Structure formats: C-alpha cells, structure tokens
Image (cartoon, rainbow, N blue to C red):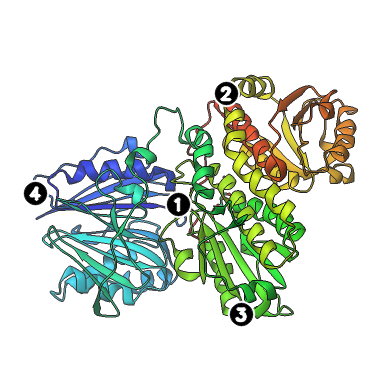
Amino acid sequence: MCGIVGCVGSDDTGRIVHQGLENLEYRGYDSAGIALTGETLTLAKTAGQVDELTAPRSADATAGIGHTRWSTHGEPTETNAHPHTDCTGEVAVVHNGIIENYDALKTELSEQHVFRSETDTEVIPHLVEEQLADDVSLLSAVQRATQRLDGSYAIAATAAGHDGIVVAREDSPLLIGHGDDATFIGSDATAFVEHTDRVTYLESGDIAHLTADDVTIYNGGESVDRPTDTLDWDAEAAGKSGYEHYMLKEIHEQPRALRQTISGRIDDLAIDVDLDVDLPTEYLQSVEEVQIVACGTSYHAGLYAKELLETYAGVRVTVHIASEYEFNGERDPWRTLVLAITQSGETADTLSALREAAGAGARTLALTNTLGSTVTREADDTIFIRAGPEIGVAATKTFVSQVATATLLTVHLGQVRGTLSSQATTEFLESLRDLPGAVQQVLDREPTIERAAETYADSEAFFYIGRRTGYPVALESALKLKEISYDHAEGFAAGELKHGPLALVTPETPVIAILTDGTAAEKTVHNVKEVESRGAPVVGVTSEPTLTTDVDTVFEIPACGPLEPVVANVVLQLFAYHVANEKGRSIDKPRNLAKSVTVE
Ligand code: F6R
C-alpha cells in the first residue's frame, strides 16, 4: 500500500521521481522520500505529503528512487520515511511489503551496524552494505541480501558509485516502464504513465538490473525473458480532467466504465454473454457452491453477486470477508468455485483466502480491474471488470463495474446450468444495456443531490437500509460516507432495524432507504414508517414515486430492472461526496486509509 517509483537514464531524475510520487500518493501519504545516486548519494525525506518534499538536486545523478509511505512498522516520521540507507550513507533502499524476520536480522546486524529507524525495511540496506563490502556488484549484493529475507517485498536499491537500480519482487507488485530515453520502475504504472505505456510486470522471485541502456531480469539465478505489454490507459485517463477530486471524476466516469465493462460481451443475436474466460461448461454445471472472498467495497459487490447468482443461476453462494475465510472441509473442492473479487488484485487478505482455497484444491476465479496484478497470476481464471484506473481511495466506479461483471457471470452461469429463462436473460441484458444511460441521468441531477447533502451534512449519524440487492447497496453507501466524511454511518438490512439499531434513531439521524426495483421496497416502506415515528428524517431513493409520498427527501432515479440498486448507489456516492466536501475533508486521501491494502 506504499508507492515505489524509480528512474534511470534521464538527466532530470529528481523531478521525474517527484512527479511519480505525486501520481502515487493515493497508495499512501504519511511520509515520502527520494534518493538520487551518481558518484554520491543525495537524500530528501519528509514526514508529510509529497508536496512538502523538495525534489533533491544532484549534478551527477544517473538514477533515482522514491517512496510514499503508509505506515505499518513505526510512526510516520521523517526518520521512518523511505528511502532507508546503510551505515556509509551510500546505499538507499525503498520497500513495499513486510519483512517477517526483521527482528532477528536487526538483532544480528546491530552488532556491526547502526539502525536509525523503527522500520523493518532498514535491515535491507545494511544487508546490502555487508555484501558490497565483499566487492561484488549491486545486483549480486541485492540478490544475496534478499536470500536472507522472509516475507513479501518489492524493493528498489541504488548505491553511490554503482550503475543503475536493482529491483526485486516477492509477492508485492512491481513493474518496469520502458521509455524512449529512460527506464522506470513503479509499484503500479501510475508512477510513470506520462512517460511510457510499455511495461513489463515482474514475477515473484524476479530480480532485475536497470541501467541507462539495458534491463536484465533474473529468477533463481537464471536470466529470464518477461513480455512487454502495452497499457490500455494513459496519463490523461489517470489525471483529474478538471474535477476537484479524483473521486468525483471517477463517479462521473461510471457510464463510460460500465460501457467498457459490457462492451463486446453481450451477443445480441444469440442472447448470450461472452466473458472470454475458459470455464468448461461441464465444470460450471457441476459446481455446487460458489464461495466469494473479498474485502470492503468488493465484499459488498460480492453480496450483490450472491443475490443474483442464487436467484438466477441456481447455485448456492457464500460470501466471506477474506480475512475470515477458511475453506470448509465438508465441501467438495472439485465442486466449489472460489471467486475472488478485488479491484486492485493486490489485497493481501483476498490473496491469502485465494491461496487457502487453491491449496484445498478448489478452482479459483478472479474478478479484478488490474491487468498483471498478483491475483491474475495466481487465480486459475480471471475476468477483468475494465473500469479503467481508479485513483481515489474510495472505490466507486470499480464497484459498479464489479456488479455489472457479476451480472454477466450470472447470465452465463444461469444459461449453462439451464436455470435462467430466456425472458429473464433478456431482462438482465436490457438492464445492463440501460445502466450507463440511467447512471448518466443521475449524474445530470447532481446539483439536487448536492443541495440535499448540504441540508443533512451536520447530522449526528447516517443510517442506510435496504433489502435483497438493496442491502449491499445500503452497506456500500454507508461505507462510502464514513470513509470520506468521518461521520458515523451504518448500513442495515431493513428488517433488522427493529431488532436493535432502532435505539440509535433520533431526529438527528437521517435514515436513507433504498426503495428500488428488486429490493422488496413495499416491505422497506414499513421500516421507513418505524423511523419516521421516531422523528428521523428520511431520504428515499426510488424509481417509484408512490413509495415515497411521506418522506422528507426523494431522489428519483430512472427504472432500470435488476440493476436499479446500482443506480441508487451512484446517487449515494454523490451524496457521500458532497457531505464530505461540505466538511472540507481530504476526499481522495482519507485519513488512515490507503488504496491498495497489501498487508494482512
Ligand atoms: C472502500 C475501498 C476498500 C476496498 C478494499 C478491497 O472504498 O476501496 O474497502 O474495497 O480495501 O480492495 P480491493 O478491491 O482492491 O481488493
């Protein structure tokens, strides 16, 4: 969840690395640093955000590495910020991941080396220093140092008087960007996207040496070839395009993201979908249970997928918070499909659940947004949600694209298993085709949503209620509000209110009710009455105005079949955004959070 960037071969390295850190700030932003090397090493660090870091200058710099941090070991101080250096001040290392045996290594190295920080990372430059003392190359020194490390890491090392940058990857993502005049490294392509779209994804166990004219990659001591891919998005797609925040831009990109998700996947003539995934028909017919593993917003997309898959594809579905997942020994692994939903493809909890499932012999399928991510390498099959880059920490367009992709999967499974009638198929596909337009209509009504957000912004707490597919949307909408506004917000299954949460409801706590198609809205209306009689203001989201005659605020949305709750979610993303903006919160970088959570 920290960000790494590096550059070799440019005479403007300091500025390029600084720019890369700005691009990467969404991965972590409590401290940052840059090291430049040529004949000497120049270092700059800050305990704040990247704009508080002055890019170092060095007349002889030929290589540079930078890091933006989200603390795991040690407070976010300047001393704990990366890059970390050795005793001589000539070796600099940046690192993402966790060195599990750092305590033992630190104790051993402390006899000869002086440690300054509280981080696990600092053992690495000292290990490299020990190896360089044997007069070996920087490549060999890093290679030998990594042999001592247990855990997950993406490392970039550079040293005064040594040519280029050496990088190593074990689990944590790292990729190389091939520019015309310079070569780059990044924990994701956002780090260098304005310089090149040609990338090489490193694999676990790879070590690479980057110099001004060459890139060589080794694995297990052997030189290996890794393919060069072309990114399907560019610097403009990763920029803010005039919006005040990435989150707002990404909310507005949802019609396009959804069109990309479904593009080419619906066969109108055959009334079928093509997910471009190799899941044999006989296997899908024999599946007894789909187990979904995911975290946060992706978990909510999983709950939505469960409703669809169980109802229309006739398969039992269990949804697991990934960090709590264990493969149930009573299930037949051959008849269990484990579906990992993760926009980043790098979430440690989700990867660990996936590994547990694979270890038990289950077939695994990933639903992700990120080409080349770890989940795509480890899962048996992958379906891409094609939402485009998402920079804001709060997931928005990836949620709607995850649900749209799960809908395509439901249609495919329902057809293969013979549980989905042609009428239901047509209804689903129509709902999918209508979705981008319906979302656009909601976006066009943003000023109304903004005004309502201003009205309710000072409330004590916000409660969201819904049933069926309205329930995951209630959970997701509450998550969005709490993470960016820091207000207390909770989602409930509407029927559960009277079993406890109703005690929290007062005239100071608006209740937001999802009253859309497919969510048993006529029942939820009774729960609306329960809270109204306790004096709570009610906000209703519906396509059916007769359901909301009594409520204080109505967000009317276009009818959109089984995916109508997704349209309601977009309304509530905007609501959350404007409540948070009214309070002047740091919307793209909420406190304590990071975009990609690569530790368990
Ligand atoms: C919330 C949010 C997180 C992520 C969660 C899983 O807005 O973004 O809850 O959904 O950390 O991330 P991925 O989908 O990358 O596995």
Q: Which residue is mark 2?
A: 582
Mark 3 and mark 2 lie on one chain; the one further toward the N terminus is 3
Mark 3 and mark 1 lie on one chain; the one further toward the N terminus is 1
User: Is 323 situated left or right of 231 in this image?
Assistant: right
Depth check, front residue: 442 or 331:
442
Mark 2 and mark 1 lie on one chain; the one further toward the N terminus is 1
Circles 3, 1 touching at the beta carbon (< 8 Å): no
Circles 1, 4 touching at the beta carbon (< 8 Å): no
Decide if ligand 1 comes within 8 Å of the CB at mark 3.
Answer: no
Mark 2 and mark 4 lie on one chain; the one further toward the N terminus is 4
The circle on residue 360 is: 3
Query: Which mark lies nearer to you, 2 or 4?
Result: 2
Query: Which mark lies nearer to you, 4 or 3?
Result: 3
The circle on residue 71 is: 1
The circle on residue 60 is: 4
Give SS at disc 3.
loop
Residue 347: percent from left, percent from top: 51, 59
Give SS at disc 2.
helix
> Where 255 sits versus 179, above or below?
above
Task: Inspect the image, locate mark 1, and give the three-letter code of the amino acid beneath it.
Answer: Ser
Badge 2 local density, few (<14 within 10 Å), some, or many (20+)? Answer: some
User: Is 90 situated left or right of 329 in this image?
Assistant: left
Query: Which mark lies nearer to you, 3 or 1?
Result: 3
User: Is 224 situated left or right of 99 in this image?
Assistant: left
Residue 401: percent from left, percent from top: 56, 48
The circle on residue 438 is: none
Task: Inspect the image, locate mark 3, and give the three-letter code of the amino acid beneath it.
Answer: Ala
Task: Inspect the image, locate mark 2, and give the three-letter code of the amino acid beneath it.
Answer: Glu
Circles 3, 2 touching at the beta carbon (< 8 Å): no
